[in-house]
Structures are given as C-alpha cells and as structure tokens.
C-alpha cells in the first residue's frame, strides 16, 4: 500500500507593458475614446461656425481597442485597456518561450539535451531580471511505502526534485543557459526505499541493492549550455554538466509526463535511466527543424553511495543520439553508447548500449 501527498508551491510576478494611447482631435462634448462619461449639459451655441484649416486633413479617431483576451490584463471598470501579454504568470505554460538549444519552443526540451513532444506541458514560475529569463519548477512527494512479503519493507520518505534555469540571448543568434536540479533523496538514507524487483547501485560500496530503489544524489544536475543559430531552422550547441546527462536514451523518468504523478521510480529506472546523473559530461550537437544529432563524452562510472558530494569528472565514455519530432505529439530517438566500467562493484565490465524510444502526448482539456 502506498499513500502519497503532493505539495506544490508557486509564486507569481505579473508584468505588463506600458499602455500606449493615440490622441485624436476632440470637440467639446465628445466622449473620451474607450471611456464611458456621464452626459454633459448642453453647451452654449457657438458664435461662429468652425472652419477647416486649408491644406490639412484631420485624422479620424482610431478604432476602439479589442476586448482583453486570455492572458491579458482585465479591463478596469468603465475603461477599455489595450490587450498585452503578461510575463511571469504562476504556473505559466512555456509554449511561447524560446528553447536553449535551437530555434524551436521550450516545450520540446526535457532532461539534459533530450527531447519530448512539442505538445507536452512545461509549466514553471517565470521571472525577468534584466536580460535574464529565470524559471523555477519542481515537485515534492510525501510517501509512506509498505511492500509485503519476505522481500518487502516499510519506509516513509520525501521524493521529487526542484529545478531552476537562467537564460539570456547574446546578440541576435546566441543563447546561454544555466540549469540546476536538486533532489531530497539523500535524506531518506543510503539504502533508499523498498521497491520489489528493482536493482541497481549500492548503499555501502560492498553489496548491490536488490528490491530497493537507490536514492539520487543531492546535486542531480549543474549544467551550462550555449547555442548559436545558423539559420531560422538550424543551430549548433554545446552542453556541459557536472553532474549532467549524456546524449543517450529517452528523458529521465521524473521528466516524463507518463509517470510524473508517481511518487516512486519505475522498477526499470536503473536499467533504462542509469546515466541521467553522470559525474562529468560534454555534449555537442546540431539541430535542423525537427531533427537533432548529438554526441557526448562522459564519465562511464555511475555515482557511488556518497550522495551529498560531486565526484571528479572523467570523459572516458562516448554516446551518440539522433532525435526526431515528426509531429507536435510525437518524439522519437535512437541512441548508442560505449560505457567504461559503469558498475562500482564490477569495475572490469564495460558495456555497449542501444536505446530506441517513442513518446506520444495527447493534451486533454
């Protein structure tokens, strides 16, 4: 039996552009455009008929401003305001924010340099600090886990992640991004939590964890990326992380919409996503439209049982990934890696790994 409670906290900064108004000539008794005024008493009859100035055409009053649309400032009572987008809305969907790695929208980007469908939601708290665009998002789950049988166990813990990003443009073509992700997992203890059939990593450096999910490192990602737009559809990028995620496989499970609401990792997590926290990675790639080709040099050894530190980097392994988003709802990838000595308890074993995956997202509501 598992009981979980999700806690979400968010804040908002609402920013609107300065209102602009175009003034048109008015005669006494005419109402101000966009404002309902009480009726005025009749004016005294003019002594002379106004004459048009020769050689000058007076402009007609501008049309009334359209009513406010979703995402714009609501009208003040008795006054029509011009619509304007608001930056920094709480829970704002980043469907119109530029991406870090290429000329597409941010919704496509997931963990590391991986892609998800463009139709995927990507909500965050968005702030502006000068030229910097800053975003925060995360999820924390309070969990009590009970798994019966001789191989089961009980555990109460907090799982999830908190992530922050800061990005800005450089000139007309460059974009820089810093990203950090932290995990509360180390506070649950070195042995993690009960998860029948799951295997991977170690709690003491001597024996493998079996029927348990290992905790993730406190620092799950500390990375920087820079992209340069080659054309309106193409870009080149470089990404470096300590820790980071190499160009292999689908997005890590905590970034996949299909399991985002689960307070626990899938039992296949270590078998499929074991490279998502890598102590040293450098990735370079090219993007053209809906295609991306990238390669990584990275440290093959998986994180050890010490969850609060950052280990020394070593680029001894290599990975290659090709990604393709043929529609807004579909993201495909195929990847290959040669990983040197991934397992701490079996250091003599190297691995060659293949991965192929598809993610399909259908917005509801």
Image: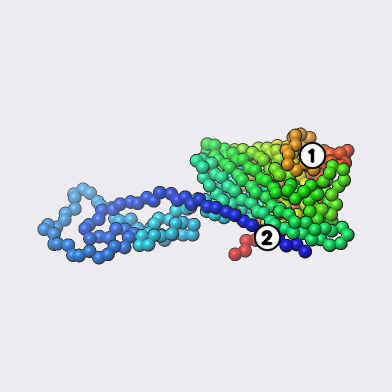
Q: Is mark 2 on a helix, strand or loop?
A: strand
| Image coords of residue 318 (percent x, y) | 77, 38
Q: Residue at x 29, y 58 (%)?
A: 32
- Which residue is tagged 2? 5
Q: Residues within 10 Å of mark 1 (few under 14, many from 20)?
A: many
Left or right for 74, reference 285: left
Q: Residue 132 carries which label?
A: none
Tag nearer the camera, 1 or 2: 2
Q: Residue 300 carries which label?
A: 1
Is 36 or 11 nearer to us in this picture?
Answer: 11
Q: Residue at x 57, y 42 (%)?
A: 167
Residue 6 visible from this viewpoint = yes
| Image coords of residue 226 (percent x, y) | 61, 38
Q: Which residue is drawn at 81% across and 61% down?
A: 147
Q: In which quarter of the image is residue 123?
A: bottom right
| Image coords of residue 162 (percent x, y) | 65, 49
Quadrant that contains the C terminus: bottom right
Q: Is mark 1 on a helix, strand or loop?
A: loop
Residue 249 visible from this viewpoint = no
Is 318 or 137 nearer to us in this picture?
Answer: 137
Q: Which of marks 1 and 2 is nearer the N terminus?
A: 2
Count the marks: how many?
2
| Image coords of residue 58 (percent x, y) | 25, 52
């Amino acid at each position: 039996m598992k009981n979980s409670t999700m806690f979400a906290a968010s804040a908002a900064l609402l920013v609107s552009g300065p209102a602009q108004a175009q003034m048109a000539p008015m005669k006494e008794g005419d109402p101000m455009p966009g404002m309902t005024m009480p009726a005025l008493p009749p004016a005294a009859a003019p002594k002379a008929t106004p004459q048009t100035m020769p050689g000058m055409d007076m402009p007609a009053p501008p049309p009334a401003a359209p009513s406010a649309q979703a995402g714009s400032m609501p009208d003040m009572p008795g006054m029509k305001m011009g619509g304007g987008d608001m930056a920094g809305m709480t829970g704002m969907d980043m469907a119109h924010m530029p991406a870090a790695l290429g000329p597409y929208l941010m919704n496509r980007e997931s963990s590391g340099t991986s892609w998800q469908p463009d139709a995927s939601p990507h909500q965050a708290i968005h702030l502006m600090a000068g030229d910097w665009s800053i975003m925060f998002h995360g999820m924390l789950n309070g969990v009590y886990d009970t798994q019966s049988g001789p191989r089961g166990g009980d555990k109460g813990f907090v799982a999830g992640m908190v992530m922050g990003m800061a990005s800005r443009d450089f000139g007309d073509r460059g974009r820089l991004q810093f990203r950090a992700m932290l995990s509360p997992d180390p506070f649950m203890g070195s042995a993690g939590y009960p998860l029948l059939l799951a295997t991977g990593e170690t709690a003491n450096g001597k024996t493998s964890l079996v029927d348990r999910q290992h905790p993730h490192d406190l620092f799950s990602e500390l990375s920087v990326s820079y992209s340069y737009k080659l054309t309106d559809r193409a870009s080149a990028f470089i990404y470096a992380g300590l820790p980071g995620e190499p160009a292999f496989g689908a997005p890590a499970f905590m970034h996949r919409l299909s399991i985002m609401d689960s307070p626990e990792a899938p039992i296949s997590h270590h078998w499929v996503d074991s490279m998502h926290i890598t102590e040293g990675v450098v990735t370079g790639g090219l993007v053209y439209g809906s295609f991306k080709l990238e390669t990584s040099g990275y440290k093959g050894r998986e994180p050890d049982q010490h969850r609060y530190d950052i280990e020394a980097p070593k680029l001894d392994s290599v990975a290659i990934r090709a990604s393709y988003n043929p529609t807004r709802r579909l993201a495909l990838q195929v990847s290959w890696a040669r990983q040197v000595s991934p397992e701490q308890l079996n250091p003599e074993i190297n691995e060659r790994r293949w991965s192929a995956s598809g993610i399909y997202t259908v917005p509801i509501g």
